[in-house]
Image (tube, rainbow, N blue to C red):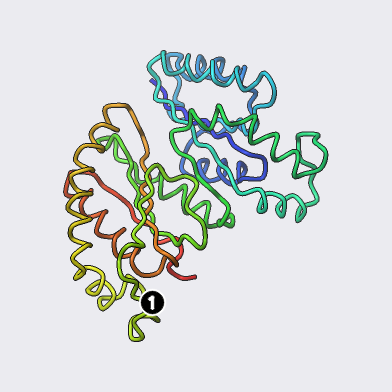
Amino acid sequence: MGEFLIIAGLSGAGWSTAGGTFEDLGWFVIDHLPPALIGKVAELVGRPGSETERVALVVGRAGGGAVQELADSLELLRKGGDRVRVLFLEASREVLVRRFEGTRRRHPLEGEGVVDSITQERVLMQPIRDMADVVVDTTDFNVHQLRDRLLDLFSREDPAVSMRTQVVSFGYKHGAPLDADLVLDCRFLPNPHWVDDLRPLTGMDEPVRAYVLEQPETRQFLDKLDDLLGLLLPAYVREGKSYLTIAVGCTGGQHRSVVLADEIARLIEARGYRPTVQHRDVDR
């Protein structure tokens, strides 16, 4: 059986960077593949003697009827027993506008200006986003950071681990991660920012960790969350979820959320999973 990764998303969100990254990881990458040809590629990969095991298909934007063709092709691949995952790349409207203006490229959709084209495309691609196994928001990424994010998601995969789990700390004033499956708000805890000695530190420093963890509400929150994780994690696995992103936010993303993200990762690890942790806004 083959392993297929479908790379789709919004124009300007990073398809070419993703394709190059997977090529470096040893995947056989086919760029700008029409969705109607996915089945033909699967037939070639499945033939006796084929040495191609992992194929990344960069379909990018599936316009018009191609969205349904892509959905149909994915269903056929999965029915054939192949491992199939969908990676969807997106970004905020403002960032996509800047990227198109910076490169002076025309948007592939012929709307009434780039903003209108981006809006149309987001609506058009929503059914594919709904089918995605993992959604990566590239708003805050340059090409190197996007590459690192994809390497983190795909380069250390263990076949024995059926669901990759990531915990992300963030600051609400910078916006919640668009690719989060669960979002937890820890702004109910006392804020170390208002303690003069702690303000210049982060949740990665021991004095801040001690301050956050000594709050009575912190232990209560983590105990109840651990019970919830005991219910949710195996349920997600049973439903075939490949990737789970848990985001925990505080005001600035530098103190409380950083401490709690590390603690939540420990809870997840104690339940037999191998989470990764990203502190998105700790250096802002």
Instruction: Give the side of residue 123 with respect to residue 71, left or right.
Output: right
Q: Position of residue 201 (x, y in %)?
A: 36, 79
Amino acid type, callout 1? His
Residue that appears at 48% across and 28% down: 131
Instruction: Answer above or below: position of 255 versus 59.
Output: below
Q: Position of residue 227 (x, y in %)?
A: 18, 44
Q: Residue furthest bottom?
A: 197
Residue that appears at 56% across and 56% down: 141
Q: Residue furthest right?
A: 112
Q: Nearer the viewer, residue 185 or 116?
A: 185
Q: How many marks?
A: 1
Which residue in the structure is indicated by mark 1? 193
Instruction: Give the side of residue 103 with respect to residue 147, left or right.
Output: right
Instruction: Answer above or below: position of 30 versus 210.
Output: above
Q: Nearer the viewer, residue 7 or 111?
A: 111
Q: Position of residue 102 (x, y in %)?
A: 75, 56
The quadrant holding residue 213 is: bottom left
- Secondary structure beneath dot 1 equals helix
Q: Position of residue 246 (x, y in %)?
A: 35, 48
Instruction: Answer above or below: position of 50 versus 134.
Output: above
Residue that appears at 39% across and 25% down: 83
Instruction: Give the side of residue 88 with respect to residue 200, left or right.
Output: right
The quadrant holding residue 169 is: bottom left
Q: Nearer the viewer, residue 184 or 113?
A: 184
Category of crowding for the residue at label 1, using alpha-carbon neighbours closer than 10 angstroms: few (below 14), some (14–19), many (at least 20): some
Q: Residue furthest front?
A: 188
Task: Please state, as top left, top right, bottom left or bottom right, where the N terminus lies in the image.
Answer: top left
